[in-house]
Image (cartoon, rainbow, N blue to C red):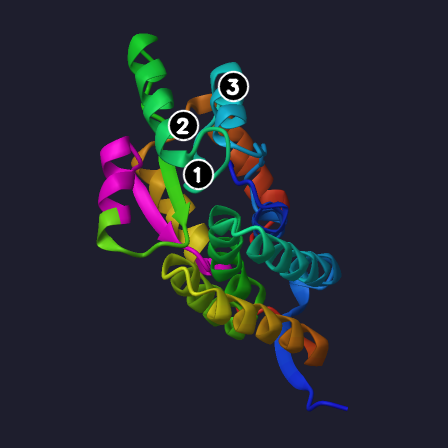
Amino acid sequence: MPDRVIVEVDEGLSDLIPGFLAHKRTDVITIFEAIARRDYAEISRIAHRIKGEGSSYGFGTMTEIGRSLEHAVAMRDDGAVTTLARQLLNYLDRLEIVFQPSKD
Amino acid sequence: MADDSPDNRALIRAYLKKTPYRLEEAEDGQQAIHKFIAGKFDLVPMDIQMPIVDGYEATITIRAWERANNRRRTPILALTASALEEAVHRTKAAGCDAHVTKPVRKSTLLDAIRNAIEENPLDDERADLANLTEETCPTE
């Protein structure tokens, strides 16, 4: 059993989290499919979105992965894109969410 | 608001819950233009990277329509994951009034909305409605 990654998330977003995380899993699959056909525009679009959404929902690591993905795809570095997509999947697999009262 | 990401739209919807603001959603720039022309809005939160018509183009089109129809300038708030100076400059050049970088915190977004609306006061009818809603439905 891999180590869990415990993330504190605003309880005001609790209804949205299951759908959000499911969409990120779909994004990983879409990235793998896009790498296979060298569709860099599609990967770039998804990476940019992950970068913008992650921390807003409380997942700072996701924003960092999105930022690195955006850079990797700009460099046309298929190896790094694949590694980062796997990293995102691994992160999603290990996530454990703890809801906290809203801070703002 | 215009944003192609359902997750971003859901997030902004959650942020604006229990505030006096009412939200109309568009999934791309083209929808945003159509809804803007057909409706009456106090503010447009505009994502930049969108399919069909992007946020730059949508903003330019909205500004041109306002000028052609002698309409007051509605504040447009650019919401983008790019914090680069070039991106900020480009949103301003397109006609956006302010720039908020994603990921965005609830307090940051609400401050940006409040500032934009304060600089461009609501018309009387909607101001009354906002005051009434604020009294009965306080901001979190």
Q: Which label was assigned to residue B1?
A: none
Q: Is residue B100 magenta?
A: yes
Nearest the viewer among B18 and B112 is B112
Q: Is residue B54 left or right of residue B21?
A: left
Please, what is the three-letter code of the amino acid marked with disc 1?
A: Met
User: Can you say whether B4 is above or below A45 in the image?
Assistant: above
Q: Secondary structure at mark 2?
A: helix
Q: Residue furthest top?
A: B69
Q: Residues within 10 Å of mark 2 (few under 14, many from 20)?
A: many
Q: CA distance from mark 1 to mark 3?
A: 14 Å
Q: CA distance from mark 2 to mark 1?
A: 9 Å
Choose top left, top right, bottom left or bottom right for residue B63. Answer: top left
User: Can you say whether A94 is above or below A32 in the image?
Assistant: below
Report whether residue B22 is seen. yes
Residue, x 55% and y 30% (percent of image)?
A: B129
Highlighted range, magenta: B87-107
Q: CA distance from mark 2 to mark 3?
A: 10 Å
**Chain ID at mark 1:** B
**Chain ID at mark 2:** B
Q: Residue furthest right?
A: A1
Report whether residue A100 is seen. no
Q: Return the disc, 2 or 1, that comes first in the chain's sequence.
A: 1
Residue placed under numbered mark 1 in the picture: B46
Q: Secondary structure at mark 1?
A: strand
Q: Which label was assigned to residue B58?
A: 2
Q: Return the disc, 1 or 3, that comes first in the chain's sequence.
A: 3
Residue, x 35% and y 40% (percent of image)?
A: B116
**Chain ID at mark 3:** B
Please, what is the three-letter code of the amino acid marked with disc 3?
A: His
Q: Which label was assigned to residue B34?
A: 3
